[in-house]
Structures are given as structure tokens and as C-alpha cells.
Image (tube, rainbow, N blue to C red):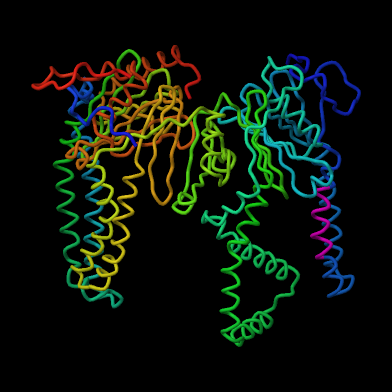
Amino acid sequence: MSVRPETGEPAAAGPPPAAVAAGPRRRRLHPLTFVVGAVRELVALLAAGAAGLLVGGVSTAFYFTLAGLGFGLAFHVAGWVTFTYVLHGDRIELRRVLVGRSVKSIPRDRIRGVDVSASLPQRLLGLAVVHIDAGAEGGEGTLNAVSRQEADRLRRVLLARPAADGRPPRRLLARVSPRWYLYAPLSGAYLLTPFALAGSVLGTLYNLGDDLGLITRQRVESVGHGVAGAAPALAVALLVLLLLAMPVMSVIVFALFNWDFTVHERDGSILVERGVLTRRAVSLERRRLRGVELSDNLLERRAGVVRLGALITGLGDAAHRGRLLPAAPRRAAEDLAARVLGAVPGPLVAHPRAARGRRVARAVAPLAAVAAIAVLAGQPWVAYACAALAVPAVPLGLDRYRQLGHASDGTRLTVRSGSLRRRQVVVDHGAVIGWRVRRTLFQRRLGLATLFVATGAGDGGYSATDMSESDAVAFAAAITPEWLAPFIERPAPEPPAKRGAEPRP
Amino acid sequence: MRRSHHKDGGGPHPPRLRPPEHRVSPRAIAHWAIEYLLLWGLAFGLALGVAAWLGDEGWSGMPGWLSGRVGWLPWAVGTAGVLMVTAAPVWRYRVHRWEVSADVVYTRTGWFSREWLLVPVSRIQTVDTEQGWIERLLGLATIKVNTASHTGSSEVSGLPADVATRLAEQLARRAHDLRDDAT
């Protein structure tokens, strides 16, 4: 094994000095790491132990608790002692040597992102967890946990390309204004968070109580009787309170998750930081950025609010880690999109009129089918219900048609679709890795085609639904002429040629 | 929004994709027919069983309007199966075509719903050939061209086994020569 000096590390970085032998230094995680782990267990066990002490005095359960505590502490210390990591010039090695020996080696040029996050106790102790993501070929590794400075240094060193030296400048690309937190109730997910929160709190309480033996059949039953006996007015009041709390809670939860959401640029990566209890920092490598996605729902659209996401190749959990802006005014999102990728191409080209009928038919058809079966089966009420539902389905179909569009500005292409949840994707021309044209029997009759843009990032493919057939081919041919040219059929000009040579974009 | 720049077929020659050059092997018809026969045979058997069981038991939870008509089920499944076994394989054979140009793999697949797929050789990550037991009986093979995107990954079934092997080797070699990052 060739041992190379630790290149790429800026001289300015100041790790705690230690005896450095020749070659890269073997490092350990921060000593306080096992304190965090042990303290967490200590709290849980202390609670259990105290309860045990209260209930049964110094019993076997209490000794078990003590033994568990000792074992947990030993486990954490052992975990800390046996784990080391070494930063080589070309790779980072994570090794755990106990009885067996496991060495994970992540090539540095495969590293796609380095996330730094810290939970509340870790932040108090100045620690941070470093998560290294190297895509499908490189695997991933976690350093849980190192000091904050070391985390920053690792992120800088691991993401630095060889050319960079010195501390590269950090440029602010976007910052979420606190006023935008008020957009939280517009997105359905945050509205439901109070329920999820209440559910998880109740569940935790129940489990804890169950573990401690506080929950018995009698108590559950007496609580049940108490609830059943309470005035219905109380239940209604609680429900109203919960409904009123929903928007407020959603804003609070949104603010907790997206507190001081900032997007920075630093040597070839985009750095997204957010959160208050757990501060998350995600580094997205710019050379892996293939496009961006603007999405909104009906309410957000009315308020002119969109969410911005990045399409990055080989990014796991892209829905969360690829987020560039939470709910933000459209102008701000487009502005950031222009800074990270380039201007969003526009205006969009509308799809042919034939597509409109198809969108409406697709919205109404399932209801019509159910209604038809219901009538055959002699269940008129089901049919009436379907008819009632079909009334809003028509404007939905019309809106789906209105939202369809595609455009290209010579370097980037964009496609848009959807109504209740609308998505507009902007993809770099160079990121297109294939084309798929789909035409069902109905589309063939109407002269329509759905064009899929294949990319190696995001969902892997994005569709422009129901373009006219010739538009679909022309669109693809304009973007990658050399791929399509051999397969394009140009029949002899048919009778009345109204225009001259077709403009080649 | 701006209207379509190609005036919806109003131009002198709207661009169209021509069909790929090569058909798959005619034995592919037999392959698809056997596959559909097995699948729909199984469905028919199940339908027959369900109808017989429901008819005998006179299951009380069944709504009245259904009980009289349960005997139709195997007939409906059987008719659909016969149609699928006889019509679909021939239809698919007429649609399935493939071609490999200098730098693009071009395929047309499907029957009711057709798909034209263009995969540039430089973006290919792996090329697999596969043979199921029916395919091995008939001397056929399926070739799978995989890229970083599922949407951009192509599959041609019903190729003669030797053609598939040769093509896979050739594509893998050329993809290796042309490959950049492939994403």
C-alpha cells in the first residue's frame, strides 16, 4: 500500500496538533462522542431505574438497569476506541478493528456530497456528524461524531478539487426570508404535521409508560370511561382547537426545519444549510447538477409560491437532500435556478388542442367506468356519486391541459405537467442521455405523442405529455441533432408547400 | 404561451421517425404466444375455480346482483385470453424493430401502445443478454441496454440468440470506447 502525503488539505486548517508520523495521520472520532451516546442511554436508564426504585425499592430490576448502563458505556467506549479514520491523498479509509477488521475505503474522486449535521446535544458539545456520500460506485460512510472544526475541515478537504488552494471564498446565493415561513400552511404536508407530532408523542408516552409498568388494563379502561363520559362539547372544542392549531403548528414546524435556510456557493459545490434543532448542511457538487425542478400545488400556485429542487446524479434521498428552496416566491426561486443552473427557458410552447380532450377524458374516464359498472349492477347511488365527482374533474382536466408545456433555449430544455401538483423540470441539454417517444392507440389517432427525456438524475425521466408527433421529433432533433438525424424520414415534399425551408434551430 | 413553432404539421415536411431497419425473429411470435397462453391459461383456471366455488357455496356476503352473473367470469377471461394469444403476438411482431447506427441504439416496441427509444451508445453503462426457458427452446434471446436512467434503458426481446450475443459484445465494446461519464 503506497502511503501518500495528505494533499489537498489547506495549510490554514487548524486541527489539534498531535504527534504526526510519516504519512497520513490516523484519527479518532471526538472523545466526547461516547459521552453523547452514553448520556442518551443514561437518561433513558435513569428514568427506568428511578421508576423501578420508586416502585419496588432496590430490586433485581434496579441492578439490571445498572448493569445495562455499565454495558452501554463499555460499548460506546469500545466503539470509540476501535474506530479510526485516515485521510489519504486519494481516498478516505474508515476502519473498525475489534476482533474482526473492517476497512471501508472511499475514493475521494467518487465523493459526491458531504453532509454535516448535529443534533441538539451534539451542538451543545461542539460536535457534528459527517456523512460522506459517494454514489452507487463508492458507497457511503458516516463519522459519528467529530468536532465542528474537524467536520468543516473534512468537508472542505473532501470536496476540494486539486486546483483549489487556500480557503475558497463563499458566496451567498439565496437566503430564505422569515416572512416566507407563513407559506407553510399552503403545502399539505406541513398542515398534517400536528397530527403526526401528536401521534408520535402519544405513542412514545404510551411505550414509555408500558415499559415502566405504569399502564395497566384498569387504568386504560378508566381513561376510556373518562373520555366516553366527557361531554361531547369538550370533544368538539378539542377538535376546533386542533383545526385552529394546524396552520400555526405548520408554520412553527416549517420554521424549525427551515430556520435560516441559506444557499451558498463554494468551490464547485452548492452548500445548503437549514434547521434549528438539527442543523443540516448538504453539499451538492456542481458538476453533478443536471437540472432543477420547480414544483407547486394548487394553493401555492395561487399565492405565487414554488419549491425548488436540484437534479443531481447519484444522490440518495434526493427529495430531502436535493432541496434548494422550500416554499418561496416564484421570482426568488427562478432567480436561484438561474444562479445555479441558468435561466429557466420560456415562454413555454402549448401542446395541441387535441391534448385538451385527452386530459379531460383521462380525468373523467375512471369515474365514468365506475358509474357504468354501477348502473349495470343496479346501484344507481354509486353512479350519482360518480356524476357529482365528475363535475370538478372537468376543470381539473382543463387545468392539466393548460399546465402542459415545453420549451428549449438552446442550452436547457424544460417540460411542465400536472395540476394538483405541478412540476416544471429544467434539464441541461448535455444531461439528456436518451429519448423515448410513446404513442398509445388513442394518441396515434389524434397525432399526439408523449416525449420522455431520459437523464441520469432525479426521477431518471421527465415527460412532455401529448405533444404533436412532429413537434416531439423536432424538439428532440433540435437538442441532439446527431442522434436523430439518421432516423428522420423526410418524405418528398407533398403538394402545396406553404413555407420555405424549415427553420433549423 | 407561444404557439407551437412547427405549426402542427403545417410545414412542408414535418419530421417523422422512420421505423428501425431490422425486424426481430419470426419465432418471437411463438415465444409471445406461449407466454400469453401460460398466463391467460392460469387466469382462466383461476376464474373457473372462483366461479365454481362461489356458485356452489352460495356465499351469503355476495351482493345479489353478482351471484347470478358469476358464471360469466370464466367466459370473459377466456375470450380475452384467446384474443390476446392470437392477436397480440402477431401485432407485436409487426411493431418490434431495432437498429444500431454509428452512435445510437434505436428500437420500436409495444403493440397497443408503441414506444420509440433512442439510446446513444456513449451513454450505455451495461449491456446484458438474457434467455428464459421458452427463449432457449426457440433459440431466442433478449438484449438489455442499460443507462443511468430507467427511462433511457432499452430492451429488445425476440432476437436470434447468435445475433443478440454478437450485438451485445459489439455494443459493450463501443460503449467502452465512447464512454465519458455516462450520466
Q: Examine the image and state in which quarter residue A152 appears.
A: top right
Q: Is residue B176 above or below residue B55?
A: above
Q: Nearer the viewer, residue A14 or B55?
A: A14
Q: Is residue B7 magenta?
A: no
- The residue shown at (85%, 26%) is A14
Q: Nearer the viewer, residue B66 or A270?
A: A270
- The residue shown at (14%, 47%) is B83
Q: Examine the image and state in which quarter residue A62 appears.
A: bottom right
- The image shows residue B103 at horizontal and vertical percentages of 35, 15
- The residue shown at (38%, 29%) is B152
- The image shows residue A259 at horizontal and vertical percentages of 68, 47
- The image shows residue A192 at horizontal and vertical percentages of 55, 60
Image quadrant for the N terminus of chain A?
top right
- The span picked out in magenta is A36-48
- The image shows residue B70 at horizontal and vertical percentages of 20, 67
* Residue lying farthest to the left in this orientation: A495
Image quadrant for the C terminus of chain A?
top left
Q: Magenta region, mostly helix, strand or loop?
A: helix
Q: Is residue A219 left or right of residue A122?
A: left
Q: Is residue B121 above or below residue A312?
A: above
